[in-house]
Amino acid sequence: MILGMLKKKYRWFKAIMVALLVFSVGASLLLVHAEDEGIEETSDSSEITPTLLRAPSTTEIYLDGVSGDDTNDGSTATNAVKTFEKAKEIATANQTITTIWVTGTVPVSGEISLAGTNAILKRESAFTDYLLETQADTIFHDITVDGNKDNITATGSIYSLIRVANAIATIQDGTVLENNEARHSNIGTGGAVTIEAGTLNMTGGYIHDNQANWGGAIYLGGRANFNMSGGVIENNHAVSDGSK
């Protein structure tokens, strides 16, 4: 009898243990499932939607060969860059730039071109001096230099777009020198270019709509030479003498 009771208790104990085991496994599966859902929800909630950030577009920068600094960004006249090379670098990287305002004469030499940009050089309305001045032999191509003559606010003497001195400069295809008025006394010489003790060779390009007291387009000073084998010079005006 005692043996029978022990067997009966053993069967009950076994049944209880099996039930506990099944419950434990089921609870573990539910917990794992819940944790998986939590991970998925956390993953979904923390997912970052990428946003394309664009720098604000700009259409102009400033170049000052006297007081500028190439560590500047050129965004304003007070933050002007100093060298032509730096201005071109910025305009190449930012194709929305269409105007490089010149606020101080820029020394140049070597190859001067704005190819690869959408920009032109332009006289700032209050600036009166030369825009570019050769320091050594210089070749101009694929560049527009604009004197902005209809919007000048400065009074007094206005200089040429380019001064060639003690060097040989060459104007090639794609060069445009335009819209400048050199004025007042002996300063008003060479609407586009003044040459002094130097040589200008024009093999291409276009010089037009400039004005000066002497030399509506080009003025030859002492020991100056001008050779033209290509390009076009037209619609320039000299008040005193010399349409060229």
Image: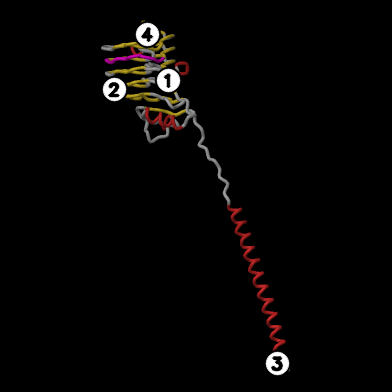
Name which residue lies at 60% across and 59% down: 39
**Residue beneath label 4, please?**
244
Give how far across and how far down residue 190 sits, in percent.
36, 12
Q: Amino acid at mark 3?
A: Leu
**Of helix, strand and loop, which one carries label 2?**
strand
Q: Residues within 10 Å of mark 3 (few under 14, many from 20)?
A: few
Q: Secondary structure at mark 1?
A: strand
Furthest-bottom residue in this view: 1
How far from the left and from the top, in percent, is residue 118? Answer: 46, 25
Label 4 neighbourhood size at 10 Å, few (<14), some (14-19), many (20+)?
many
Counting the numbered discs, the total is: 4
Does residue 185 appear in this view? no
How far apart are the two marked residues, 1 and 3, measured between alpha carbons? Answer: 115 Å
Residue count near mark 1 (Cα–Cα under 10 Å), binned few <14, some 14–19, many ≥20: many
- C-alpha separation, residue under disc 2 versus residue under disc 4: 24 Å
Across and down, in percent, residue 122 comes to: 43, 22
* Dot 2 or dot 1, earlier in sequence: 2
At label 4, which amino acid type do we have? Lys
Which dot, 2 or 3, sits closer to the camera?
A: 3
Q: Disc 2 and disc 1: Cα gap in Å?
A: 20 Å
Residue visible at 36% across and 6% down in the picture? 242
65 lies above or below 151: below
Q: Residue at x 70, y 89 (%)?
A: 6
The image position of residue 77, as x and y in percent, is 43, 29
